[in-house]
Image: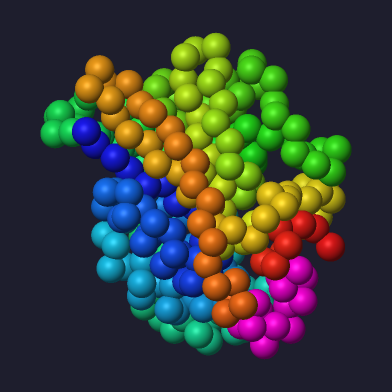
Amino acid sequence: MKKFAVISDIHSNVYALKAVVADARAKGVNDFINLGDILYGPIAPRETYEYLRTLNALTICGNQDRQIYQATHSDVQSNPTMPFILQDLGAEPLTWMRQLPFDSRVLPDSRPLSLPADIYACHGTPSDDLTYLLEDASSGRAVVREDAEIIDLLAGITAPIVLCGHTHLPRCVQVSTGQCIVNPGSVGLPAYEDDEPFPHAMETYSPMASYAVISQTTEGSWDVSFNKVAYDVSKAVEAARAQGRLDWVHFLTTGRRQ
């Protein structure tokens, strides 16, 4: 039986990532799918990159991966964390991020690549890494979209398993097409606030790291399990505090908005 550990939104939190990998391997899972937003954060960008590269994970690009390698001089000057990220990373991780694909069709076995994949992976939606696939946050908090709206955002993707990240909220939604859409939650940042495209917050109410496991059954269908992993949050908090990111300190320790 094929198994994948699905991870997303690490946000430079290598301490949470190591705990998630250890937990997945203890469950007999050694293949990883990484849905992006990997190195952006005030914790340990370069160390996260170096550790992730040892996993040989199938990795796609997230919106905040783009934010790093597309940053202009004014972007760097206006972002309190970007100078640290770029200095800590150096050139090699930027080159690596630039070649990451926007999305991926994952084949669970050795079938020819010309056949449709059982699993489709993206960061946000199949057409936009800034849009939430499953949730509408225009009210300030996440509300699951209507069935028809989710199907519209899938933009013709027919894979029975669709993986997405971006919201940091673990969720599994089955739509009327029979497709199962899985967001594994965030490995490294359990809450955040954002002003774009409207003010809103995402909260998990726990400091634990999140990931999912998808397992192919003998009948060819897929089981989904969600996992919450405790780790030494104090190390991530110390790093965020050193960069003056007290908002991240609160997010990391509580899983709640300010």
- Pick the front one: 74 or 138: 138
- Pick the front one: 139 or 207: 207
* Quarter occupied by the C terminus: bottom right
Q: Count numbered badges in the picture.
A: 0
Instruction: Please determine whether, in this image, residue 147 is positioned above or below residue 168.
Output: above
Most common secondary structure along the magenta stretch: helix
Write the residue at 26% across / 60% down: 56
Percent x, y for residue 76? Answer: 66, 78
Write the residue at 22% across / 33% down: 1
Residue range in magenta is 237-250
Left or right of 126: which side holds 120? Answer: left
Percent x, y for residue 191? Answer: 70, 56
Left or right of 160: which side holds 11? Answer: right
Percent x, y for residue 29? Answer: 29, 48
Instruction: Please determine whether, in this image, residue 231 is positioned above or below residue 82.
Output: above
Write the residue at 76% across / 69% down: 250
